Image: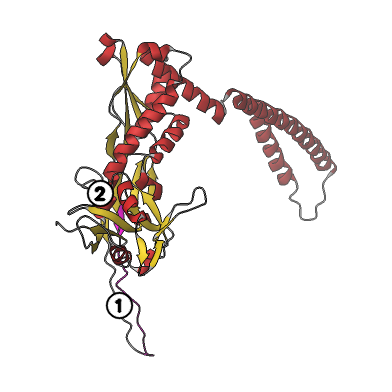
Amino acid sequence: MKELKKLYEERARLVTQMKALNTKEDGKFSEEESRKFDEMNKDFDTLSARIRNLEKVEQFEKDEAEAEARNQAPSKEEAKTKEEAIFQRWLADGPNGISHEERNFMEARAQSQGTTTAGGYLVPTGFSYELEKTLADYNAVMQVATIYPTPDTQDIEWPTIDDTSNTGSLEGEGDALATTDLTFAQVVLYAYIISSDIVKTSRKLLLSTAFNFGAMVNDLLGERIGRKSNALLTTGTGSSQPQGIVTGAGSGATAASASAIVMNDLISLQYSVDSAYRRMPNCGWMFNDNTAAALRKLAIGAGDARGLWEPSFIQGQPDKLLGKPITINPDMADIGASAKSIIFGDFNKYVVRNVNGVFFQRLEELYAANGQVGFLGLKYLDGKVLNSAAIKALAHPAS
């Protein structure tokens, strides 16, 4: 406020004049000086009062402006609802169903994630949360691995080290202290594209108000991407695709048979993993349903008919085998020649790089002649075993 600034300057000049007048060592004023000082003091009080009043007015106007801005700005919940409404209209009506400003908003969100596929948008947070839940339901590896979420698709360099073979030393007083160099390795986590493949639906179904197409999208895309990503995170080669947890696992034990598993195979595999990793809370077994069926029939033996399998009677708690939890993974190999049918270890040592969100494309013109619209979901992720000593595989002989 210009007037307030002017008053500040005027009062400052007055204070300077009052200080200049009050320079006598004995502090005594002449009659004229005393009268002049009293006038300046009154002027100072008057200016100060005017300044206080204007400061109150200025603060009031500032508060009013902030209150108005708060009232006009949408809350997080309102913004979320608006975002999902835009997405729903785009699902049903395509680009013509949303305004130019709304298109710019959705495109900006996609670009912020480093996803630049033309004609597509990032799934809103609410949709994405439900979709990610569905994806996880169909992805056994992600249920037990370390998940590393990232906001974009930039490559990530991740240092690794296996120091289990090194120990400290006992030193005598005055002895030279032993030194051991740490040897770090490094893995790079990329952002590979996992596609749902194209889902086609009729335009008539999209326009139906009785049908929740958004829920169907979550189920279809979540299931498709979940199944495909689980397959890659299990047995991916690591070359231009994620490294699967089985692919990156160390060599633990060789089964006695190409077509069966016995208790000694399991014990050999379990104790091939260093005890430091066996003590970890996320240490466990992973195999498919067919292998599970075979293992449930195994007994302790030596006259003890009790099974090795320990069923859980608590909801949400997994069954156990030899005291360790079990994860069923449909993409693990069956028991068979040269197959790796079981892995065991600390699954926290397998990391999944998970780029936040799901990218979504609406393919209208491609199927317009058939009265259909295509939809495509894209998920960006990668997976790597950080330490092959922590996760070991049971391999069957060739014959």
Residue at 22%, 63% in the rendered image: 256
The residue lying toward the viewer, choosing from 96 and 396, is: 396
Residue at label 2? 334
| Chain part drawn in magenta | 155-174
Q: Farthest bottom residue?
A: 173
Give left or right: position of 282 versus 28. Answer: left
Q: Quadrant of residue 323?
A: bottom left
Q: Amino acid at mark 1?
A: Thr
- Whether residue 312 appears in magenta in the rendering, the answer is no
Query: Does the rendering let one see residue 114?
Result: no
- Kindly report the distance in space between the C-alpha atoms of the residues bearing marks 1 and 2: 47 Å
Residue at label 1? 179
Q: How many marks?
A: 2
The residue lying toward the viewer, choosing from 354 and 248, is: 248
Q: Farthest left residue?
A: 399
In this rendering, the answer to whether 327 lies above or below 197 is: below
Earlier in the chain: of badge 1 and badge 2, it is 1
- Whether residue 156 appears in magenta in the rendering, the answer is yes
Q: Amino acid at mark 2?
A: Asp
Residue at 41%, 36% in the rendered image: 134
Indicate the secondary structure of the residue bearing disc 2: loop
Give left or right: position of 328 versus 14. Answer: left
Indicate the secondary structure of the residue bearing disc 1: loop
Residue at 25%, 49% in the rendered image: 334
Q: Label for residue 287? A: none
Give left or right: position of 233 versus 91. Answer: left
Q: Quadrant of residue 25?
A: bottom right
